[in-house]
Image (cartoon, rainbow, N blue to C red):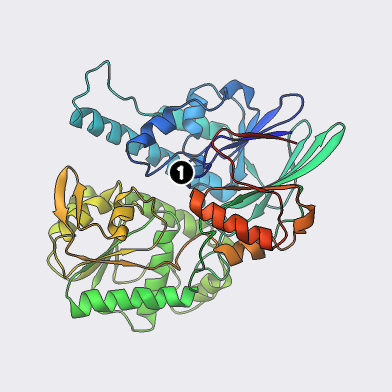
Amino acid sequence: MKITFAGAAKTVTGSKHIVQLWDNTKVMLDCGMYQGMGKDTHTLNSEEFEEPLSVSAILLSHAHIDHSGLIPKFVKDGFEGKIFCTEATHALCEIMLRDSAFIQEADVRYSNKRHQRSENDAYDPLYSFLDVEQALQQFVIVKENEPISIAAGIKATFIPNGHILGSAAIYLDIDEISEKHTLLYTADIGRYNATLMRNPELPPQADYVICESTYGDRLHDNTIDAEQGLLNAVLHTLQEKKGKLIIPAFSLGRTQELVFALNKLDLYGLLPDVKIFVDSPLAIDATDIMRRYSHLLNREVSRFKKGTRHDPFGFRKLIYVKEQKYSRRINTLDEPCIVISASGMADAGRVKHHIYHALEQAKNTILFVGYAEPNSLAGRLQRGDKMVTIFGDDRNVEAEINYIKSLSAHADYNEIMRYLSNNNSGKVKRLFLVHGEEEVAQKFKGLLKENGYNNVVIPDKNMTFET
Ligand SMILES: [Zn+2]
């Protein structure tokens, strides 16, 4: 067996790993897009990383674009195999991938215009709506925890891992005539006692592990502290400063967590009487899917639904904004309010406009609630830059920049260790750390060593490991 790390190697985005058997059968674990890498993003996503016709199947862990976003491009380039994932992941991919095609067409048009590229030099979008529709035809839904045959010699089991709705680790049983291997791909591991998601299910012992390491150097606060942090930011910004609270958030997952947390705070009478806008068409669609699959969410959500408020994602003060003209009106609205808008790294989407308008007034607060690539707008603001360029204009940073770290959808290092606790570290032949910045992965490698993992590898991009 060979494993090639074609993405998310010493980076957090662009997840794609290729498993190859002795007879050249290849399957790909995720097919994700790079995000938030500045000027390099387009080039990285345009690179050919594998001959599409040589791959038998894609096994998709979850719907986040940094894991699913290049599937339509791979299909456009000739991939004809099946794409295996859970039912909820499929439902979310329908909206996420269509949205991705839309964003790329708009971004490329803007970028070509801005850099005055001639027709010959103009960038093409990575894929179109039609490529997305074709890709969606190739999806096959699998049931959680039921092994399914993917190709000759490969069985896969999707084990829910609590990261987002539908997300799963992928466990492979590989039979190569003379050798048998098991391989665990953790994908993105969720947190324990999270706001909406159930705890990750512990995967069984594996010979080889491909493990994420986003927060391999960090311990999160618990979820209760996150809700307290959110309430503090709301009261401080809206009541004391009479300003706006802008929260950049991923449309899928983080937005619904925030809405549910605010819903609970409001139920307890703790929120001031202000408007709360969720300004993201994608978040509206994602919320509908969360409602449809709410039976997959945790016990707190089902308890809440049995109480006086039946909808975790809707209450009187909350306004979902679909149309752009209403989004623009929020920019000029002169009253304290909360705006939750995408994207989480603030590099694209409507939140960029909200930040542009709010940034030069000290009464406003920009509250970050998730991971940000260091070079993204969110990364630069969190680093403490006093001036940032948005839409080509320099903007002074007068607004307060704040951060809640515990709302992450990723396990911290203790939670990853807990997640791996069914594995006897001495029996794991190799553990590969992916999906983390190199420095973080190095620290996590040290910790894994203390726990008996003596064969930890942090692969470079395109490195191939052979058993
Ligand atoms: Zn993810």
Image x and y of residue 448, in percent? 65, 59
Relative horizontal placement of residue 44, taking residue 326 as reference (left or right):
right
Callout 1: 10 Å neighbours few (<14), some, many (20+)?
many
Q: Residue furthest top?
A: 120
Relative horizontal placement of residue 4, taking residue 48 as reference (left or right):
right
Relative horizontal placement of residue 297, taking residue 146 as reference (left or right):
left
Residue 181, located in which quarter of the rendered image? Answer: top right
Image x and y of residue 75, in percent? 51, 27
Asked whether 69 or 9 is in front, the reply is: 9
Residue at 50% x, 72% y: name it.
305
- Which residue matches tag 1? 65
Residue at 15% x, 69% y: name it.
335
Q: Is residue 406 above or below residue 54?
A: below
Query: Is residue 201 at least partly visible in the picture?
Result: no
Image x and y of residue 300, in percent? 54, 74
Residue at 46% x, 43% y: name it.
65
Q: Is residue 35 above or below residue 77?
A: below
Residue 245, located in which quarter of the rendered image? Answer: bottom left
Does the residue tagged 1 have its C-beta within 8 Å of any atom of ligand 1? no
Image x and y of residue 429, in percent? 76, 47
Question: In what quadrant of the picture does the N terminus appear?
Answer: top right
Question: In what quadrant of the picture does the C terminus appear?
Answer: top right
Secondary structure of the residue carrying numbered label 1? helix
Amino acid on which disc 1 is placed: Ile
Q: Residue furthest right?
A: 178
Asked whether 342 or 414 is in front, the reply is: 414
Q: Is residue 200 above or below residue 107?
A: below
Residue at 43% x, 65% y: name it.
257
Asked whether 97 or 467 is in front, the reply is: 467
